[in-house]
Image (cartoon, helix red, strand yellow):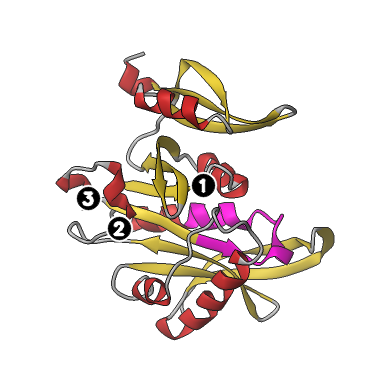
Amino acid sequence: MTETVLSGHLHRCDGRASAAIPYVGRWLEPHEVGGVIALHHAVREAVAPELLCRETNAFFHEHCRACGRILGLFADGELIGYGVLGLPAPDQESFADQFGLTAEQRADVATIDGAGVLPRWRGNGLQRRLVAARIEAARMAGRRIAVSTVAPGNLPSLRNLLAEGLTIRALRPAFGGLRFLVRRDLDRLSKPDTEGRWIALADTAEAARALISGYQGWSLSEATDGPRIWYACDRDASGT
């Protein structure tokens, strides 16, 4: 068994406050992939099909051996969540291909790939912890760029990725629907320029125009009239 990466207590179950239940997170061994596959299908059944990519069994096996790692969360003796970290070789195909990286950058990229938490344990902040732990593992593996994709309608995943410093760089069709392409450069602290604007999450056409003009999406606000995203240039890139 590998060493513990995450630990803490769960305080919500089935959408309600509950007695504190301890959980741990550790990197999984290849023989444990079957549990991840079963959990992946259970998670998919609870959300709209266009919001999550349906991964193959081979994807999970490959990411627990040759091209990445899988972080598993355990509570009450069962696997309750997982997060996939991709560590692709520079010439290896992955969704990082969509980011227009140079050959040098391809050697530095890590993919914050699929993740899921059993519905009864949501509300405990586990998805954000899975993002943060995989970013730190990417850094420790010598990677300087973390990338991911997320459907605009997948508010929990979008919120957690933006909260951990990834910013929206593009909006493109992928995995059977529209996806934001998000990225974080791990060797620098990015900050938004003071000039920017809020764009409704549902206004994908306006978001696409802002991204093409050089803006990035930085933060999500769930306002009373609907969720919106703050778009602005990178302060360092804009020279301010």
Q: Toward which corner of the image does residue 203 lie, by quadrant?
A: top right
- 93 and 73: which one is in front? 93
Instruction: Point out the residue furthest to the bottom here.
Output: 31
Q: Mark 3 or 1 closer to N-term?
A: 3
Badge 2 amino acid = Ser
Q: Mark 3 or 2 closer to N-term?
A: 2
- The residue segment tinted magenta is 115-133
Side of 218 relative to 109 (left or right)? right
Q: Toward which corner of the image does residue 111 lie, by quadrant?
A: bottom left
Residue 28 on image: x %, y %: 46, 76
Nearest-to-viewer mark from 1 and 2: 1
95 shown above or below 159: below
The residue shown at (73%, 65%) is 120
Residue linked to disc 1: 151
Q: CA distance from mark 1 to mark 2?
A: 17 Å
- 124 and 182: which one is in front? 182
Determine if residue 1 is in view. Answer: no
Q: Secondary structure at mark 3?
A: helix
Residue linked to disc 2: 94
Residue 136 on image: x %, y %: 42, 54
